[in-house]
Image (cartoon, coloured by chain):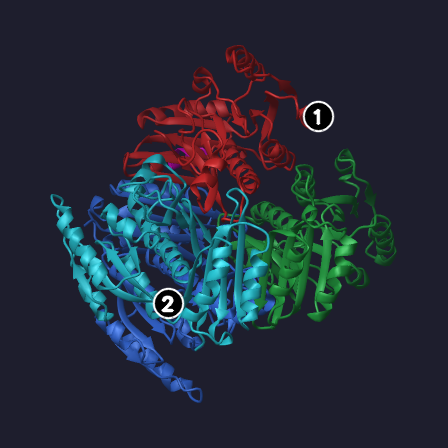
Chain colours: A cyan, B red, C blue, D green
């Protein structure tokens, strides 16, 4: 199967970026299979993502990076080049609600998520059997309310040992410590079960029920130190009415959560999400 | 054309309400064309709405009300009976943005809104020509930032003089004084240009842009003293992306606002919205 | 846990049905927890569904049925009364695509589908391990293109032996023989991977791609003799664009299919779907 | 206000197109404000749309076209370059239903549609007053069932006399003659009141009601000789249930129709729609 080089760039917007980059690629015979660009007029920043058929370029990723470095310097680019053969390694974290985890595992099995799942970490032991059935290591790290630091030290150790590149909080109901958030900045994805910024924090469906909203939602976002306030990747909603109890909201919400998380994660894995300030550019 | 009696009831839930009411109606030969019920388990309250073919009951509205009064007392009902021949009289209030007003006038002309439009009141004179073209009185009541009380005294006088039953804030960018809100409690409808409770207050689309949400929305709600916090009647959303500027959000938002307001107002006019605490039951 | 009697009625519309039925229930002390009615003006037919707290009525289901029979006769009702303790027994049929099956099994495990899954029947052996892991019998019945009758005789035998009440075609890519459709009339649910009546028959996503539609969909419907033409229970859609290949459509479609099928099946299991002519009344 | 040159290209996909074109633009100092590309893998065709700040290029449109012609020849491009100062001239055609016309006129007044409305042509005289109020010429061309050719000769004459560039059938319930379709190929936009390919032809909402679908829709498409079969630009849907009569479907449908038509027309006017075979690439 063919593999690709994905070039992702963010830089100050100015004349000739596309010309320079597309020339560079064409000059090496690179065949572009997908190209996305965005000029953000408010911030004066330019974003691009190119997917290049690797075989069309007679170069290793490393050589290509070296060749591209001068272009990148010239335009002050934040940039990355990925070879799709090197799959991202993902750690999934989960508490008691299994719907997101089960959904991600199914999509992974079905080939919808191009990554390796390095491990599942949970503060409960409930899903061990199901996870291990998929051939994935399961780590039970209980988090006691009194002393969370020991637990998170263990989590950090496990994440590191698994050589994970990204972390997915698939309804992990604990708050990650700031240093872990920072070390994996832009690579920790959370699903929050409300239409943010409404109903941040605990029990969002009950908050939504209390307020009498007519739509509930879910939000997939990158985790930052401030709770439920990181860059939003994707959101969706489900219609509700006076007929529905908080339990119904929770049930509808499950479907929205898992769809939104799966979409967000897929885009992350395909290098389609670029972060700028506290917002995202998503080349979906 | 046939007219209807609409019976709308809210009362403590207990055994035999439906039996008692439907017996009463059947006993007078009443033909029910639409019936809705809802038992709210959390509050223990029961809601119902019956639409009865008026000609099937050989009684005036007044006689029917007298006959029903004992049933209502027995079950401690909040209730109302309306004859659809007596159209509600509505005052529309508007500032500079015309899209909601134009939309409501069009729907009214097309027969989608069963009411009389008693008047349009605006703090600007911009839409006079268009409104008067529809044969509707237009009142320009400027609101000066220094002294709003004189303006609102005039607004109250005009609303009263128009014998209005309901008030629609169709993007009226002023805050109604509390006593007016209270006098028309449950009969002042506002359209807020965000997905409440997110982005209450001023410039919601700019707030939404700043936060980087992926869906924007609009909320139709009854006005209470607390700003943008009254019972929600209807909400809807529109998908946005990093490509869209605040101006795009405003443009998309116009379509959502007018649709959501029109839906909410129609339900209000058809007695489909029952308020309980700070929430609504909508028999849509 | 409390159980319920569900009364589902369809009859010619006339005066006093609700009064008669609600009187009957109230007369036996029955506490109604949910009530739905619909008068179809075009056909002159009336539909109702009452959910009654079983403990509030001091009667077995059988006694209650006997007591109700005269009322039913008086109004020429098609009717059924179910005790929610007697769960429906469902047979799932599947070919090679597993997404709907996996989704239904997960929802069933999570308590979203109130039924017993009597068996899974497939013309392939691929999903045996996964199904048996859930403790559900798996029957592999190959269907040869030359002689399908032997296979379907075996299918019928298995369905009968499982004492199934309903059959779900969860992407079973074979056409059921007419006599089986008829024997289980109104109890065989199919998911078709298009927005019917568009793209009936084979390869609907490829048909949709060819036609260049901007939305793809899925349809949950009861199976009748005519292919993909039975009463529709539920439909939903997903937005697509020129960017998407037929494979993308298939992938998006999986999410729509499983959601639509799960919703339709849940409503069927909760006796919320009433069939009339070739259409459904869904008290969702 | 700044104006733009819009370059729209469709050509066989091969190496170096983007490099060549973006070099060309950068070489003339052109500042690209929006860029879109699409490689259609199935057809091997490449599509692009560039929006260039006109003032950044020190050239008239004509000079720029001359300069670009060799590039276009080299890559066998179908291409067009438009100066946004030269607004498209549009003729709107309408029968008795006014909702689409009123909506387009409002959006046009509000600045959402960047075009000149050259005239409105109708087979009825109903909307004259409203149209003329907007300062737009109104032509009443009755179409008799016996002899349509005279009417369409007059329509052609009027369209030509108005120097129209595009024609919008805003619920014009007559079928345009083939030669008119062909002369304005890719520039006649129709709104069909169903989710095509379902329910082509007459009375689609009644067809939809009859079939018992749970979603109704509308389709904006380019007109070709084959009725309701041209390239689809945009579609959307609205949820319906057993509660809704054909009249309700018509009413819901009006909202979908006008939104879908307005979106499609806006994209057309902004040169965002490229036709290939019987499909569209929409750079929305």
Q: Was residue B25 drawn as part of the magenta stretch in this picture?
A: yes
Residue at image point 54% right, 66% down: A24
Compared to residue B181, the image places residue A130 above or below, namely: below
Q: Which numbered circle lies on residue B129?
A: 1
**Viewer-closest of B50 and D54:** D54
Residue at image point 34% right, 77% down: C122
Q: Which residues are magenta?
A: B22-28
Residue D250 placement (x, y as % from top left): 60, 48
The answer to whether residue C192 is seen in the rendering is no
Q: CA distance from mark 1 to mark 2?
A: 60 Å
Q: Which residue is mark 2?
A: A114
Residue D107 placement (x, y as % from top left): 66, 40
Judging from the image, what secondary structure is the residue with disc 1 in?
helix
The overriding secondary structure of the stretch rendered in magenta is helix
Compared to residue D78, the image places residue A247 above or below, namely: above
Residue B182 placement (x, y as % from top left): 43, 18
Nearer the camera: disc 1 or disc 2: 2
Q: Is D269 displayed left or right of C228 in the figure?
A: right
């Amino acid at each position: 199967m063919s593999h690709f080089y994905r070039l992702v760039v963010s830089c100050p917007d100015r004349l000739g970026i596309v010309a320079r980059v597309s020339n560079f690629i064409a000059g090496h015979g690179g065949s572009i299979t997908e190209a996305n660009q965005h000029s953000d007029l408010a911030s004066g920043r330019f974003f691009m993502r190119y997917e290049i058929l690797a075989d069309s370029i007679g170069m290793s990723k490393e050589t290509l990076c070296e060749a591209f470095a001068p272009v990148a310097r010239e335009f002050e680019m934040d940039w990355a080049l990925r070879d799709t053969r090197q799959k991202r390694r993902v750690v999934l974290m989960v508490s008691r609600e299994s719907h997101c985890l089960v959904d991600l595992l199914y999509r992974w099995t079905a080939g919808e998520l191009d990554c390796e799942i390095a491990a599942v970490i949970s503060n409960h032991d409930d899903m061990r059997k199901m996870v291990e059935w998929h051939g994935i290591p399961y780590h039970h790290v209980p988090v006691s309310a009194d002393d969370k630091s020991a637990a998170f030290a263990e989590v950090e150790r496990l994440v590191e040992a698994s050589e994970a590149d990204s972390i997915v909080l698939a309804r992990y109901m604990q708050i990650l410590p700031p240093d872990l958030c920072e070390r994996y900045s832009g690579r920790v994805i959370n699903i929050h079960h409300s239409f943010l910024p409404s109903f941040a924090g605990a029990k969002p469906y009950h908050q939504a029920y209390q307020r009498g909203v007519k739509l509930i939602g879910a939000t997939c976002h990158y985790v930052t130190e401030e709770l439920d306030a990181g860059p939003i990747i994707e959101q969706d909603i489900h219609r509700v009415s006076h007929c529905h109890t908080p339990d119904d909201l929770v049930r509808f919400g499950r479907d929205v959560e898992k769809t939104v998380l799966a979409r967000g994660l897929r885009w992350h894995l395909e290098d389609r999400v670029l972060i700028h300030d506290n917002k995202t550019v998503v080349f979906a």
